Image (cartoon, grey):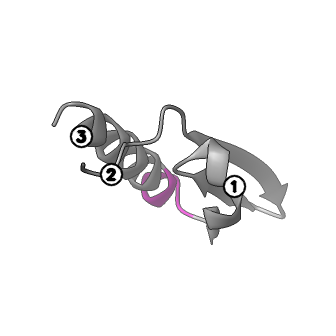
């Protein structure tokens, strides 16, 4: 049997003002049943944060449409 894709995933986005800029933190868990596999990233660019969220969603959806 093949590996069963995760049923649920989570991506938490936190935006924090820092001076004239912004710190955006993302915590991504691609399988909430195995939270130890979560990863974090920090960016200051809105487009980079949106790209990371888009990648997360595309990857999760692709696992469920195979």
Looking at marks 2 and 3 on the same chain, the residue that comes earlier in the sequence is marked by 2
Q: Which residue is drawn at 44% across and 55% down?
A: 52
Q: Residue at x 64, y 43 (%)?
A: 32
Q: Give the distance between the C-alpha atoms of the residues marked 2 and 3, in whole angstroms.
A: 14 Å
Q: Name the residue under label 3.
A: 62
Taking depth in this image into account, of 16 and 12 the one nearest to the observer is 12
Q: Chief secondary structure of the magenta span?
A: helix
Looking at marks 2 and 1 on the same chain, the residue that comes earlier in the sequence is marked by 2
Where is residue 41, by image quadrant?
A: bottom right
Residue lying furthest left in this view?
66
Q: Which residue is drawn at 76% across and 61% down?
A: 20
Q: Mark 1 points at which residue?
A: 35
Q: Give the distance between the C-alpha atoms of the residues marked 2 and 1, in whole angstroms.
A: 17 Å
Is 19 above or below relative to 58? below
Q: What element carries label 1?
A: helix
Going by the image, does 49 lie left or right of 41?
left
**Circle 1 Cα neighbour tier, 10 Å, few/some/many (<14 / 14–19 / ≥20):** few
Task: Return the x and y of residue 37 as percentages of the image width and height.
Answer: 61, 65
Task: Return the x and y of residue 13 as percentages of the image width and height.
Answer: 67, 45
**Circle 2 Cα neighbour tier, 10 Å, few/some/many (<14 / 14–19 / ≥20):** few
Q: Name the residue under label 2.
A: 3
Residues drawn in magenta: 45-49
């Amino acid at each position: 049997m093949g590996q069963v894709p995760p049923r649920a995933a989570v991506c938490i986005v936190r935006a924090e003002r820092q001076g004239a800029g912004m710190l955006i933190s993302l915590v991504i868990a691609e399988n909430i049943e195995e939270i130890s596999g979560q990863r974090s990233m920090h960016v200051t660019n809105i487009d980079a944060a949106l790209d990371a969220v888009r990648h997360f969603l595309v990857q999760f959806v692709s696992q469920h449409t195979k």
